Amino acid sequence: MAGFFIKKVIFIFGCLIFTKAVRHQRNLIWSMSPSLQIGVSRIVGIEGDPEVWVPNANVTVRHISAPHAGWQFRGLAFQYATQTLYWSEKNNKRVQALVLNGSTSTRSVYTGTSKEVDGLVVDWVSNNLYLADPNYNWILLVPLNTTETLYKLITRSGLDKPHGLAVYPKKGYLFWSDWGEVPKIEMSDLLGKNRRILISTDVHHPRGLAVDYDQNILYWVDSFKDTVESVEFNGNSRRILIVQPGTNFFGIALFKKFLFVTEQEEGHLRIFDKYSGKGYINYQLGYIPFGVIMYDEETQEIHNGCRDLGCEQICIDNPPAGPQCYCADGYQLKDDQKSCEVSQFFTEPSHIYAIRDAICQYPAHIGDMSLVNITLDKQCFLKTSKGFLALTFDGEKQTLYYTENNTNSIGRVQLRRGAYTDTIIRGVGEVKGLALDWTTDNLYWTDSTKRKIMVAKVDGRFQKALINSDLQEPLGIAVHPKRGRIYWTDPGRSVIETSLMTGDGRQTLDMKTAMYAICKYDLTTGTDEILYRQQFSSFYGVSVYQDFLIWTDSGDMNGIHVADMLTLTKKRGILHPQVGKAGDVILYDKLNQPKFNGSCAVNNGGCDQLCLSSFCSCGVGFELSDDLKTCYSDMYSDNFVLVADAYQKQIFQVGIYENRISAVSLSEHFRPIALDYDPIRQKIYWTDNEAKTLKQANIDGGSEVTMRALTTNSVLDGVAVDYLNNLLYYTDAGLDTITVVSLSKIMVYKTIITEDLAEPRDIVVHPSLGRMFWSDWGKKSKIEAADMDGNNRMILVNFTTTAWPNGIAMDYYDNRIYWIDARNDKIESIDIDGKDRRLILLEDKTHYFGLSLSGPYLYFTDWTKNYISRIRKTGEGSVEQVGPDQFSRLNGIVAHSSTEILKDTSVCFYSNCDHICIPLPGKTYVCTCADNYYLKGMKKCKLIGDNSTDETTIAITSFPVNTSNSVKFLNSKQGNSNLQVGGIVAIAIVCGTVTIIAIVASVMLYRRWRFQFIPHDRLVEDNHVGSFYRIAFPDNSNKFEPQVDIGIENPYYNRMVENNS
């Protein structure tokens, strides 16, 4: 109810001159500023007990004046035990403190607020200050027990113009008012959790709050309704105490029966009775008042729980749990639950933007943060100059996705201290736009070079072109999972388009475009508007956070910029003209990726591969089944080429005579490298240097088996099948070995070459001749041959200049070897005796990798191309494309035609070797034993160290390799050999262990030394080599924070210029 004033209006500043500052004793204190900017802002206090000075209107007034007109006091708070008064200061955007002991020295408690902070309150029990920022729509906690600049975001969701704050530490209550689009009054615990809405109806502009600790009642003012109201903590007994039309109530304070209210329309301080609502006194101030508090000891009862706990950064005494330690944002608790250390993860929300040379991060309040000691060098990570351009993120997994247009790839890195980058997609054109559907883990991108819009799983699997027609220069892309649509810009055609996530239902948005402007389009109403204009700007990336517009400019204003969308004015521009061309910018905030129950939410929507909104789809090489859920692949049975695509994590099949791709349906997807095909058993064999496995499967992907789980250091770059004798050979460039595996007993393997190998790459076998051939691209690169047991080695080609012999192929009919030289961009051949060397192909700017021969053609892969190539083995004609250009990184390749299956008799068919039978030249063979076994007698194998007479069961363990225990036999049709076993090798376990340690240490040291001299791209992206880059956090040491922001000071990573134009 409205009250009336029993005292006359008193003009406080009409004729009085104040010479004394506010003192530490009971005071009613408020802040106020001149209405016409004539004069300075002041903090004013009326000393004494209101029960005395309210009735007689005899007041003692003291004040604190701002040093100049550039200051403006707003919100107020206090801590009586420390004699400290706190205020928010508008123009310098900070919260300051002053000890009321006669001192004039202020301390900045927090810097970087917006200009509208009116909500301040101190939790005097836990020694923390809370502030509400209506522009950033968050509530911060700032610990008061430290001189460091620390804060903790308490609440930032569901807020829209938070204003007043109040706290009740004894009960663990935090209250706030919110006068945004959906006005309300809320409460929570002291951590911002357990939120509850107290008032949500008949409320318009709730402003200041005050707590009656005796009656458990919350009071507030509503500046739209011109009311003072109250409610109990449980939401009951709501009352309107005062209604005074034409006023503009702002702040409120309480002492016993008195309510003190600041009013801005007439510039009044009004005093009411909290029970009846009647008015006592109306002080006309002559200034515009803001916050008001009752600086009094009785309302701040001291409790020492936090002081006794010994928290390093933040203590919160939150009933009923009691005091507990917490850390500020950017830190995490140590195991002692008291101390804090730098957090492993990036702070959110924050702005992340690409500058080609690096990726950089700024806090969410970039528009108001202090720029003292801020340099580009400190704010950036991944400083590797790889052409970073487009960005997107996964908030739940705390992962950043980015494009590297210098390497034509898409990568990702967890936003975690010390994390490594991971390239997930390669072979793309210039990717200018990235977007993530966080509900399905689908990654979308625009490829302006190939004029496509693509989608894949976030690990690079199941890539699919959604739109590949009527695109000129696709650039930015965004997804709306709830609407099931994607949106993209095409500057080449001056349009903004949308489609379903499948690429269907394509439409052009009917909206106006404007030069040098940032525009907004309402998806609900279909209306558009210009948000911000800046002449001659080169806008590139754009992002929004709360009331702020953030964009990058890649032209003369190269850098990141901020504008206020409410006032349509620019707040700040941070420029770095000579360093790093600005690209995409994103807001890293998981609240921007809300969860909802879409059709893909459960079990990927029942889809085998891609769930695109409510539709299932399949990646390259697959077709959607009639059930519209599962994916199948229609495999070729003859005349095809198999290729391993490391970046699509798939093995594909391409018809030699048809322009169609089929994918081998594998259960696991890592990064296949080398592969070969057994046409007799219709099996594929491949190596995977990410999973560290050697695997086999049927041509349709069935019966997938891991043949060998390899060591961490293994790098299997070549594999060859002897389908006549049921053997498999592979090279290991990590251990510098060549090994043979029995395909009839896949756990049985024999290391046959361990010496004089530097970087063994590809390998082929000629079982009819008993010979094998391999390439080695080490420092002394060469093409070598040997018997299939590793003996009788012969160098066919000894390269005299730097060469990278990669893929190798065998012509069984002409007895010639073909190889690829990736360093010199050519394909050559030589006969199996090392004679008649010929040049087949020479091209520029290629990086050949895999090679295979079928009929008159050599089929090969090239890392610079996303398709298979072929040329006649004679070198005649030109290079031809085989199949479509839908691949990413093609590695191993094998071509098959049933007319070219090697037809011969296995010399090992009647061998009865215990472990492995290896064919040799002259139609002979040799029985040999698996690693760690020796040959006993003619054909039997025993475990080294086992002297028993019983036959042993094969058990594969890690002992020193023995390559000499073999016995040669003639073919059974030619009679038996009289060769005898020369002896048994006995090696002591101690010697074996020492040998292993010495070998491993020597290999590791040698490889470290050698790596600096080998520029050839590795086949596996080892997390510990130079192609990966650790995240380096900004250096927060040696901070200097002056009283007033002074802009950028001597940046290290070139000079940055602040621009506010």
Image (cartoon, grey):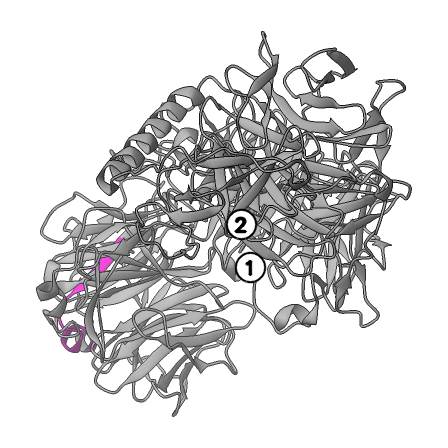
Between 571 and 523, the residue placed more toward the observer is: 523
Magenta-drawn stretch contains 626:
no
Reply above or below: 792 against 703.
Answer: above
Task: Check residue 713 in the rendering and tell me which mark sits there, or answer none.
Answer: none
Magenta-drawn stretch contains 53:
yes
Which picture quadrant has residue 232? Answer: bottom left
Tag 2: amino acid = Leu
Tag 1: amino acid = Asn
Task: Answer left or right for 579 relative to 539.
Answer: left
Which picture quadrant has residue 987? Answer: top left
Q: Residue 111 placed where, x, y %?
A: 33, 46
Between 895 and 486, the residue placed more toward the observer is: 895
How dense is the environment of label 2, judged by Cα within 10 Å: few (below 14), some, or many (20 and up)? many
Q: Residue furthest top?
A: 800
| Residue 173 visible here | yes
The answer to whether marks 2 and 1 mark residues whose Cβ atoms lie closer than 8 Å is yes
Region rendered in magenta? 43-54
Alpha carbon distance from label 2 to label 1: 8 Å
Task: Answer left or right for 752 relative to 149.
Answer: right
Query: Could you tell me how many numbered marks the image carries?
Result: 2
Q: Which circle's residue, 2 or 1, is located before the other in the chain?
A: 2
Identify the image quadrant of the C terminus: top right
Q: Which residue is mark 1?
A: 592
Q: Which residue is mark 2?
A: 587
Q: Residue 303 placed where, x, y %?
A: 11, 72
Q: Residue furthest bottom?
A: 237
At 52% across and 23% down in the image, what residue appears? 579
At 41% across and 37% down in the image, what residue appears? 1030
Task: Answer left or right for 617 relative to 1016.
Answer: right
Identify the image quadrant of the N terminus: bottom left
Between 407 and 996, the residue placed more toward the observer is: 996
